[in-house]
Amino acid sequence: MSYDQNTFANLISHAKEYGYIFQSSEIYDGLSAVYDYGQNGAQLKKNIRDAWWKSMTQLNENIVGIDAAIFMHPTTWKASGHVDSFSDPMIDNKDSNKRYRVDHLIEAFADELKTKGSADKAQALLDAMDALLAADDLAGIKKLIEDNNIKCSISGTCNWTDVRQFNLMFSTELGSVSEEASTIYLRPETAQGIFVNFLNVQKTGRMKIPFGIAQTGKAFRNEIVARQFIFRMREFEQMEMQFFIRPGSQKEWYEHWKAERLKWHKEVMGTPSERLRYHDHVKLAHYADAAVDIEFEFPFGFKELEGIHSRTDYDLGRHQEFSKKKLQYFDNELNQNYVPYVIETSVGLDRLVLTVLSNAYAEEKWAKEDGSEDSRVVLRIPPSLAPNKLAVLPLTKKDGLPEIARDIIAGCKGFFHCFYEEKDSIGKRYRRMDAIGTPYCVTVDHQTKEDQTVTIRYRDTMTQERIHMNEVAAKVLAGLAL
Ligand code: GAP
């Protein structure tokens, strides 16, 4: 399965046209890599978040959810290692003043080499880059860029600054009087809110190891190269779960969560297997002893969707050291105190929205009976995730049909989101609902007044059938459970 070259651009404009995703502060020409979700996007995002929350906290009796604040004590980020190590190597072109992440600059050049038929040269370049990055050899990286004559796409020159590390955390000041103010950070991951609450939750919830703490919430990173729509944003949402385990059992639990999370993407998000793959990390983050990405085939290639990390006792150990408070667990079975090890699952909610939209978006054409061509753009979003489940459409605005349509909505809206529309021809209204991704449409016509039947139309097959209006809610609910 692969994407048409134009599909991504079409998907972005579709997401805007149908109330899914807007550029932030668009009337002021937008803010780079920051996006707002419209009426349909916010509901889709909430449905995905709810599905994740349910799979973690409702379906696992040993996982509970919390909601920690975005602002945290500044020492949190010293202890976690983010102040010292949460950075990307950057280089600036002196002629255009454009800043690049060096790995992106080199990877783009390797892609050019591949398209020109020099796949071996491209691979050698990428291998050399990986080795230099793993060794933190910034001078070596600059030399690699110069030796390969890699140019800035704007100035076309090779006039580069030295490579420098650039910290990705946003900082701000807490306190109104400048002398009293202290620098705090907007969290770059939600995980630390879980670590610092480990004992609070364990004790108040009487949790026994192994157990997990889940959280969803905003995270912020000053990404230098922010592009590809909502794939890489400066303000985004994460859904993370830290699973606390006995030291020594990390391999087993790492494999468990690796398999569980891949299964979730297939079964709950409806992502086809061929668009998902594992990618083992070569260079491990400062806190991990094993790490894998679940990658999705986005319209611009396979990229990270979710990370599963074996974080050892690094975070709890560091918070214990910096706070001077014991963050240990007494294991009754072993009769022993220890700092638990952690397996983390971390997925970006915005990347999941992009995944669901990429899977769902289809431009379809077919021949009609009279030989002419018909077409539609449809979002085949899984019904359980779609923003609206049912549209109720009176054929005309008169003869009591709108009142019947309103009655049907009154009987359904307690169970799921409904949409009412009476403007335009019925054909146009169906097309609009296809474009928004509404899985079921019900049309109320004059026959409804005679025998209380309505036409139900299915988005994916475009087939229609006549059912009693009292059956509508049950029919839609049955479709959502599939
Ligand atoms: N706590 C671990 C952690 O934060 P990460 O791999 O840096 O690990 C986890 O991030 C997930 O967060 C990624 O797999 C991705 O889905 C999402 N993510 C990270 N940076 C992002 C960004 N700039 N924009 C959108 N999503 C992002």
Image (spheres, rainbow, N blue to C red):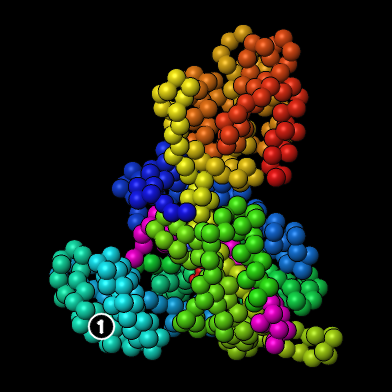
Whether disc 1's CB lies below 8 Å from ligand 1 is answered: no
Disc 1 crowd, CA 10 A, few/some/many (<14, 14-19, 20+): some
Residue 77 in view (yes/no): no
Q: Is residue 263 among the parts visible in the rendering? A: yes
In the image, is 36 to the left or to the right of 381? left
Q: Quadrant of residue 247?
A: bottom right
Q: What residue is shown with label 1? A: 144
Q: Which residues are magenta?
A: 225-253
Q: Is residue 310 above or below residue 52?
A: below
Q: Amino acid at mark 1?
A: Leu
Which residue is more in the foreground, 22 or 121?
121
Q: Quadrant of residue 57?
A: bottom right
Which quadrant of the figure contains the C terminus?
top right
Asked if residue 426 is positioned above or below residue 171 in the image, the reply reads above
Q: Circle 1 sits in a helix, a strand or a loop, which is it? A: helix
Q: Residue at x 19, y 71 (%)?
A: 151
Q: Residue furthest bottom?
A: 336
Q: Nearer the viewer, residue 7 or 123?
A: 123
The residue positioned 14% from the left and 71% from the top of the image is 157
In percent of width and height, residue 2 lies at 43, 54
Q: Residue at x 80, y 85 (%)?
A: 331
Is residue 399 within the magenta segment?
no
Residue 345 coordinates in the image, percent (x, y): 60, 69
Question: Any magenta on residue 249?
Answer: yes
